[in-house]
Image (tube, helix red, strand yellow):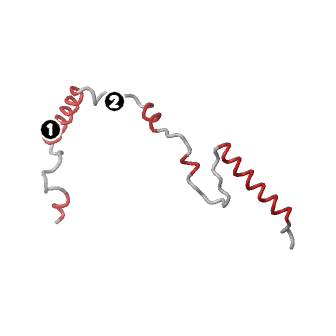
């Protein structure tokens, strides 16, 4: 009986009790088996709102005139490309049809 004495059994039981009490008091998660858990990730504060607050407010959502101007610029650029023959092909006449 090497190492299995009443003193060792009691010491182990006391340490388990102390660990449980410490976990309860300080709000730690008790993991006696040492298996990996997601507790470390889940206990962190969520940062989504801080990240969203970092970026300035998008004025495109508020100003319909800005969106209309951007749409008009896009259409005029597309028209200029079509006049030069560089615009997008009509539906069903792209590269894939030309290969067949």
Mark in the foreground, 2 or 1: 2
What percent of the width, then of the height, locates residue 7?
A: 86, 62
Q: Residues within 10 Å of mark 1 (few under 14, many from 20)?
A: some
User: As displayed, is residue 23 above or below residue 49?
Assistant: below
How far apart in space, not on screen, are marks 2 and 1 (Cα)? 28 Å
Nearer to the camera, 72 or 29? 29
Nearer to the camera, 50 or 74? 50
Q: Secondary structure at mark 2?
A: loop
Q: Residues within 10 Å of mark 2 (few under 14, many from 20)?
A: few
The image quarter containing residue 16 is bottom right
The residue that label 2 is drawn on is 58
Nearer to the camera, 55 or 69? 55
Q: Residue at x 36, y 28 (%)?
A: 57
**Image quadrant occupied by the N terminus:** bottom right
The image quarter containing residue 82 is top left
What percent of the width, then of the height, locates residue 25?
A: 68, 43
User: As displayed, is residue 18 above or below residue 3?
Assistant: above
Left or right: 14 as drawn, with respect to 80: right
Q: Earlier in the sequence, mark 2 or mark 1?
A: 2
What percent of the width, then of the height, locates residue 86?
A: 18, 45
The residue that label 1 is drawn on is 79
Q: Assess whether mark 1 and mark 2 are in contact (beta carbons under 8 angstroms).
A: no
Q: Residue at x 87, y 71 (%)?
A: 2
Give the label on residue 62, or none: none
The total of numbered circles placed on residues is 2
Nearer to the camera, 84 or 11? 11
**Image quadrant occupied by the C terminus:** bottom left
The image quarter containing residue 35 is bottom right
What percent of the width, then of the height, locates residue 47?
A: 49, 38
Q: Residue at x 19, y 58 (%)?
A: 95
Q: Residue at x 21, y 26 (%)?
A: 65
Q: Secondary structure at mark 1?
A: helix
């Amino acid at each position: 009986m090497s190492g299995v004495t009443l003193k060792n059994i009691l010491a182990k039981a006391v340490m388990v009790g102390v660990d449980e009490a410490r976990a309860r008091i300080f709000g730690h998660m008790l993991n006696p088996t040492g298996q990996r858990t997601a507790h470390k990730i889940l206990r962190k504060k969520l940062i989504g709102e801080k990240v969203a607050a970092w970026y300035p407010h998008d004025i495109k959502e508020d100003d319909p005139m800005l969106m209309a101007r951007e749409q008009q610029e896009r259409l005029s650029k597309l028209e200029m490309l079509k006049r030069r023959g560089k615009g997008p092909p009509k539906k069903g006449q792209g590269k894939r049809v030309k290969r067949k």
